[in-house]
Amino acid sequence: MEELKNSLNDKRLQVLTLPEKGRCLFTSRDFSPGEVIISENPYVSVPNKNKESPQWKCEWCFSSANLKKCSACHVVWYCSSQCQKSDWKLHRVECQALSKVDKERVKSLTPSIRLMVKLYLRRKLENEKIFPSTATENYKNVEALVSHMSDVDEKQLVLYGQMANLVNLILQWPDSEINIKEVAENFSKLACNAHTICDSELRPLGTGLYPVISIINHSCLPNSVLVFEGRLAVVRAVEHIPKGTEVIISYVETAGSTITRQKALKEQYFFSCTCPRCIKMGQSDDIRESAILEGYCCKNSGCNGFLLRDSDDKGFICQQCGLLRDKEEIKYIVSELKLMSEKASLSLSSGHINEARKAYKMIEKLQVQSYHSFSINLMRTRETLLKIFMEMQDWKEALTYCRLTIPVYEIPLSFAFFKYYISLFHIGMYPRFHPLLGLQYYMCGKLEWLLGEVDEAVTSLTKAFDILRITHGIKTMFVTDLLSKLEEARAEASYKLRSQMED
Ligand SMILES: C[S@@+](CC[C@H](N)C(=O)[O-])C[C@H]1O[C@@H](n2cnc3c(N)ncnc32)[C@H](O)[C@@H]1O
């Protein structure tokens, strides 16, 4: 830990331990918005292959193009000999282990099992000095991670035990070299420390363990953001961070209500957040925020009030006009939506895109009649419809849905405590510099341009650039591409204006 602390000191960062949070990362100089605070390569990583991301991916860079399978183990894929070479030191031993495993069992290996196998192989190679150990790349940093073993429930512990046995079966090491209890504990460490590696558009690609970045704690009002440049994890400041401030990122979707965020944090990370948003839980502003984000709308379509459960438990009362929405009606809507959502998601996952489009349109219609106009559920349905229309190459409808989601990303939650943050944050569901908001503007701009709405495209691409240059970094290929699109759109808009003036 001393070695790591000294290395972080050189980066003007400091590790402190607080009783209520454990280790925390603090700045020892000012950081500006968009500046990289810390970046780290994964200690171990593995690509994901599941329903949401069904393609095979390169073991090293996660690309899905030009893949070739490793001819020895038939498990791992590479997009180039360069990537294969970069991974060789670790894969050489992994390949030997995987080649001995029964073919049927190999097929069912999950990314978590593979990640754990790689973790133990890397530790072994580090002990044998085949991998150099440095202050930041060192198994000691894995040992220092929190595991929350005493908080994990019995059922989960049994599952970790079974997974640990499978790792043991793959490695086939003597008892003196592997401790099943320790492997099970390491699974618990992965659950609250590993990160989902995403591409620049936040599509999940894989899972990685970044033991130094794992020191960073959570806040629902973060001052930093974690993004990935290939396999490199990069933490950037999204606001001015003065010297002596804790670096904080968000572990969960910040758009949810306080209860939803707290539940997610408790279930996966075993703590109760006490950030400025969370300490308001149960107060009138917070109740109102939850009712808007996750509650129902007034029966009177002309009223934009939010609903709260009435004291007699007959239903929900509109806080603006006083109209009651019957409990039984709400129950019926909820069960209908559940049934419809199951059917819709089945159509989507089985590739019946037209059926999925119809099903999600019906869900949207019912949600518009039931939920508040700023509801997260309604926004999620519209995000799905946007994806469906993109897949169907119906650009006009896709643009409509893209535009419908943006105001919800930016809803004015005009609550008292948010006013305090007015200078730091855009007042909305997401902080001003949130990658999702930037990406939504980027998508909107590209669709507007494609459909010939050049002036609108310039406005949207400019907004996207203003956000993504901070979250993704001005020098990355992703933002350089966006900038050249913006410049081209600007040139086209001014050419159009000149032509109109000459006519
Ligand atoms: C990825 S680790 C962060 C580093 C951790 N503090 C440590 O000592 O290694 C995640 C764990 O840190 C703690 N943690 C993170 N954010 C927190 C917060 N805002 N309040 C309290 N505990 C927090 C929780 O125990 C959580 O499971």
Image (tube, rainbow, N blue to C red):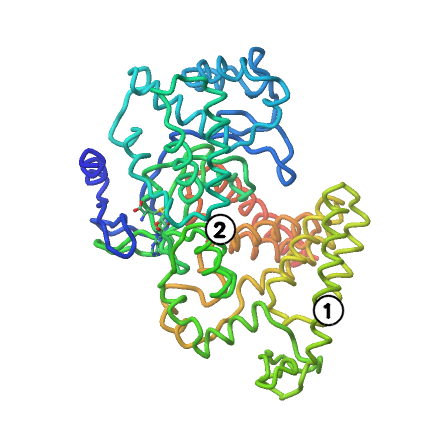
Q: Is residue 258 above or below residue 449?
A: below
**Secondary structure of the residue carrying numbered label 2:** helix
Q: Using the image, determine if residue 34 lies above or below residue 163.
A: below
* Residue 458, image x, y percentages: 57, 54
Q: Toward the viewer: 131 or 61?
A: 131
Disc 1: CA contacts within 10 A as few (<14), some (14-19) or many (>=20): some
Q: Which mark is residue 435?
A: 2
Residue type at mark 2: give it: Pro
Q: Which residue is mark 1?
A: 333
| Left or right of 72 in this view: 183 | left
Q: Amino acid at mark 1?
A: Ile
Q: Which quadrant of the rendered structure holds the N terminus?
A: top left
Question: Which numbered dot is residue 4?
Answer: none
User: What residue is drawn where x is 40% and y is 53%?
Assistant: 270
- Side of 69 relative to 115 (left or right): right
Residue 346 in the figure: left or right of residue 163:
right
Around disc 2, counting alpha carbons within 10 Å, would you say few (fewer than 14), some (14 to 19), or many (20 or more)?
many
Query: Could you tell me how far apart the alpha carbons at marks 1 and 2 are, in whole angstroms?
Result: 33 Å
